Image: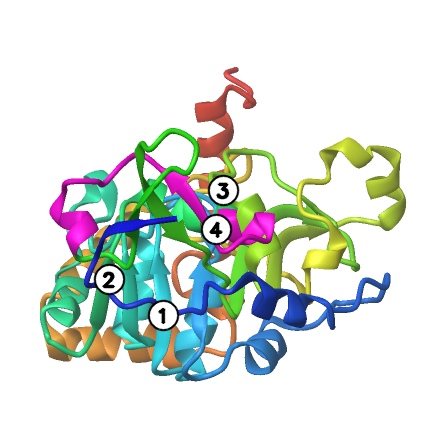
Amino acid sequence: MDVIDEGVGRLFTDPDADNARAHFKTKSRALTNKLMSLKDAVAKYVHDGEYLAIGGFGANRTPIAACHEIVRQKKKNMAFAGHTSTHDFQVLCAGKVFNKLDIAYIVGLEARGLSSNARKYMQSGEVEVSEWTNYCLSARLKAAAMGISFVPIRNVMGTDTFKFSGAKIIECPFTGQKYAAMPALWPDVSVIHVHEADMYGNCRIRDITVSDLDLAKASKHLIITCERLIPNEEIRREPTLTLIPFFCVDAVCEVPYGAYPGVMAYEYFSDEEHIREWLTVEKDPEAFKEFLDKNIYNVESHFDYIRLHGGMEKMLALRDKELMTTGNGNNG
């Protein structure tokens, strides 16, 4: 197969499918109890210098509790998939967790505005980048989930995004047409937040999944944080609701409100007031340092963080707001 052109971006992971299979071959498929604290899961599975990916979509169902714990444990020199990332990216930039980045969507918090600290970090010269589109990164995860080294797609050709990516333009052996080959992406460790999981790692998600199902299959190690633990008997009662199977999962951590201050569909709305506080305070480096000490470094857990911002009273108000928004509330 002829390579016609290639981008100048560096690949931060090995796209070799056989090398990836060698790892997955060693992964246990036994039904074992994987429950542990989030603190222990991050200490065990998130390591300096590895490749990290985060699930969710924008500010929806993003494992912010895990992002805080990764920053709190001062993980460094990681590579990161900036795929539909918003507040999670803002948090990880605050801790300078990564110094290598596959870029698709970063710095922006959608309609809320841009993170000045994230932009400052990206302009500092401390981060090596390769450029992609959101679909490119989805395709790369799809290739990994399929167990192959690349998939051909038809976007990015002829753009500067391709030029600064690690993709290649190839000629189809059947038709002679040109395609952009997206190299497989196998993260060393990923974190996905879900609505429900059992102790083995069977997971249910009740809203948009984007690439999380492929991410789960592609990740060499996967930490699940969940709103609720449910019995395995419940999983077996309605098996078609299971989207992520247990054999993809290494750790299960029950973290209610684990996406806060983001939104969790059918559970709670985003805390827009607190997200605005993040965007405002990070413009002042000294104030931002104090803010991080107060909200991340000097707290023991996500529950302490929530208590700082209104506790259960705030969370119940956000739950009411979400239920009213989704039509599941009582309009009376």
Please, what is the three-letter code of the amino acid marked with disc 1? Phe
Evaluate whether residue 168 shows in this view: yes
Q: Which residue is mark 2?
A: 130
Colour scheme of the rendered structure: rainbow
Q: Which mark is residue 141?
A: 4
Mark closest to the chain's N terminus, 2 or 1: 1
Q: CA distance from mark 4 to mark 1?
A: 14 Å
Please, what is the three-letter code of the amino acid marked with disc 4? Leu
Mark closest to the chain's N terminus, 3 or 4: 4
Q: Residues within 10 Å of mark 3 (few under 14, many from 20)?
A: many
Mark closest to the chain's N terminus, 2 or 3: 2
Mark closest to the chain's N terminus, 2 or 4: 2
Q: CA distance from mark 2 to mark 1?
A: 9 Å
Mark closest to the chain's N terminus, 4 or 1: 1
Q: From the viewer's side, name the closer residue of 80 and 234.
A: 80
Horizontally, residue 220 falls left or right of residue 50, namely right
Position in image of residue 131 (x %, y %) = 22, 56
Please, what is the three-letter code of the amino acid marked with disc 3? Met
Secondary structure under badge 3?
loop
